[in-house]
Amino acid sequence: MESIQHFPHSYNSNWTAEQNKLFENALVIYDKDIPDRWRKIAKLVGGTNEEEVKRQYEILLEDIKRIESGKVPLPKYRRTAGSSKTNDIANEQQR
């Protein structure tokens, strides 16, 4: 199965945050070998069609490429109780 992370900055602005999350979850449920993958994902997301789902997937892949190439900086999160280790790891990865 594919590993999906949420990168909302370039997603289709016509989609809600809930649709984006449903889309990400559907990608895990319906991996690339599932017949009628895009139709099933569109049905699960709701309010969209196969072509829009395919386009959303292409956008997601481009986002991932930009992030992995360092063109998109990791977000700076505010420290909260118990999150300092996570932030320290993220800061170390940026160096």
Image (tube, rainbow, N blue to C red):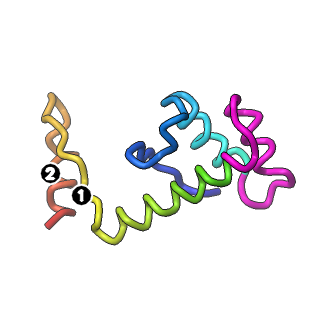
Of all residues, the one furthest to the bottom in this rendering is 69
Q: Position of residue 59 (x, y in %)?
A: 52, 56
Q: What residue do we see at 53% from left, 34% from top?
A: 14
The label nearer to you, 2 versus 1, is 1
The tally of labels here is 2
On the image, numbered disc 1 is attached to which residue? 73
Crowdedness of circle 2 by 10 Å Cα count: few (<14), some, many (20+)?
A: few
Q: What residue do we see at 46% from left, 49% from top?
A: 5
Q: In which image quadrant can residue 89 be found?
A: bottom left
On the image, numbered disc 2 is attached to which residue? 88
Do the CB atoms of the residues marked 2 and 1 lie less than 8 Å apart?
Answer: no
Question: Image check: 53 left or right of 10?
Answer: right
Instruction: Tell me where the magenta segment starts and ends, as one range.
Output: 31-52
Amino acid at circle 2: Asp
Residue 77 lies in the magenta-colored region: no
46 over 88 or under it: above or below: above
Question: Image check: 70 left or right of 29?
Answer: left
In the picture, the quarter occupied by the N terminus is bottom right
Secondary element at image label 1: loop
Q: Position of residue 7 (x, y in %)?
A: 41, 47
Amino acid at circle 1: Pro
What is the C-alpha distance between the residues marked 2 and 1? 15 Å
Q: Position of residue 94 (x, y in %)?
A: 18, 63
Question: Image check: 9 left or right of 52?
Answer: left
First in residue order: circle 2 vs circle 1: 1
Q: What residue do we see at 24% from left, 58% from top?
A: 73
In the picture, the quarter occupied by the C terminus is bottom left
Secondary element at image label 2: helix
Q: In which image quadrant can residue 20 be found?
A: top right
Q: Position of residue 30 (x, y in %)?
A: 73, 48
Crowdedness of circle 1 by 10 Å Cα count: few (<14), some, many (20+)?
A: few
